[in-house]
Amino acid sequence: MPPAGAFPKRLALVTGQLDQLNALLPALAGRNSFYTCKLAEVHLPYKIPDLEVFSELVPFTTKPELAEDQRATPPYGTNLTYAPDRYTRCHQTSGSTGAPLRWLDTTESWERMLQSWERVHRIGGTTGADRIFFAFSFGPFLGFWTAFESAVRMGCLCLPGGGMSSAARLRAILEHRATVLCCTPSYALHLAEVARAEKIDLAQSSVRLLNVAGEPGGSIPATRARLEQLWPGARVYDHHGMTETGPVTYECPARPGVLHVMEDAFVAEVIDPASGRAVAPGAIGELVLTTLARAGSPLLRYRTGDLVRPAVETACECGRHELALEGGILGRTDDMVVVRGVNIYPGAVEEIIRGGGGAEYQVNISTARALTEISVRVEAGPGAEAGGLAEKLEKLFEAALTLRVPVTLVAAGSLPRFEGKARRWVKTAA
């Protein structure tokens, strides 16, 4: 049973969302060309009475239509509510799932995102006394800059790691006695590999928190366990966001591997990717977000492509009432593949490989034949018995997925490593 007082708190949260939504929509009409055109055929009431009406009336926004808008009206498209001189920041998506999008922000929207990022830091246990090492290239991706600037505002000593080799970053982490490391899960694993090769003892580091994002690994139990083993004394903390939306979630303090959506900044929905209808709690669907705090470059019912599982209960063990996503980000709609009728998610594959003793890996999806086939190349993890590892993993795949997945053991260090988002799934048509 939800704790006493849970439903009034949830009601207050939804009321706040409606207030922000009813302030946002009139601000777009006639000013934001993209949404003025998109909503021209929609008969919105003067005031949205509830979120169900909003979802019924307002169409989805997709990344391809935003990309086409920017292609047709370069360089920023028409999803701008104000004159160009009102904007002070420009960032760009990674381009890992299509053409990169450029995104502009005003001083006001930037401030709201920094507030959200401070929340991510603080809930993870970061304080002004921490020394944070940012193992990023500091390119145009928004997350690097919001994470860094919000930590500066908190009073943290912020250590930029752009333009450095992995070995140089490791030495800097030790020399500066960094207590928090911000990077992707894959890169934290790679740093541990480099430390081993360079004979750097990570047990001597002061890192107590691995603040990870950019891919599902931070909420995958086997990956979390591996990271905490390789970085002795450090705890993994997961969260996620996008350039288009800003920071979206933070990890539940009571349930590792569960992410809460910051619903004071978003209206969140979870839909069936095929039908577009809401999924039941506990079912897997696509996360859809409406940004409430980014009026200068807003998104209404944006299909993120992220696959999530909304929790059944609205009240969490941690006492919060924001939407909880069990298992964090499970993968992406464009990564999930169907093999012989079985839905295979990237997170499930990583859990099997890490839990079975594999280290770096690559998944090949072949559509050369009538039926889609999947195979895996994997390196043995440190301490794992290489002999028989492929056969062991094949048995684990069969037990978990009821599928035969061929596994090939490859030499250590032979597969690609990634500083940003890992691209381990390779699709071939021949």
Image (cartoon, grey):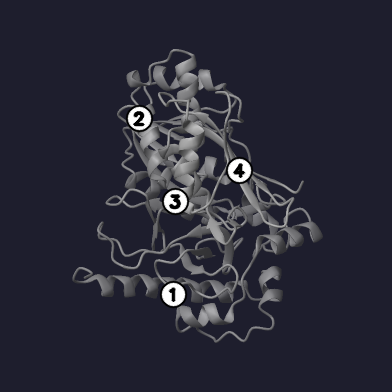
Height in image: 227 above or below 413? below
User: Which residue is denoted by mark 3 in the rendering?
Assistant: 400
Q: First in sequence: mark 3 or mark 4?
A: 4
Q: Are marks 1 and 2 in contact (CB under 8 Å)?
A: no
Q: Position of residue 66 (x, y in %)?
A: 70, 61
Q: Which mark is residue 375?
A: 4
| Residue occupying image coordinates x 40% and y 69% | 281
Give the residue type that dot 3 points to.
Answer: Ala
Dot 3 falls on a residue whose secondary structure is helix
Say which of marks 3 and 2 sits in front: 3
Q: Residue furthest top?
A: 199
Closest to the camera, between mark 3 and mark 1, is 3
* Mark 1, residue position: 19
Residue occupied by mark 2: 229
State if disc 1 and disc 4 touch (CB < 8 Å): no
- How far apart in space, not on screen, are marks 1 and 2 (Cα)? 46 Å
Mark 3 or mark 1, earlier in chain = 1
**Badge nearest the viewer, 1 or 2:** 2
C-alpha span from label 3 to label 4: 15 Å
Residue 74 as seen in the image, left or right of residue 338: right
Residue 23 x %, y %: 51, 74
Q: CA distance from mark 4 to mark 1?
A: 50 Å
Residue 206, given in percent of the width and then of the height, sits at: 33, 24
Amino acid found under the numbered disc labelled 1: Asp
Residue 335 versus residue 282 in the image, above or below: above
| Alpha carbons under labels 3 and 1: distance apart | 45 Å
Q: Earlier in the sequence, mark 4 or mark 2?
A: 2
Amino acid marked by disc 2: Gln
353 is higher (above) or lower (below) than 261: above
Q: Are marks 4 and 2 in contact (CB under 8 Å)?
A: no
Foreground of the two, 306 or 164: 306
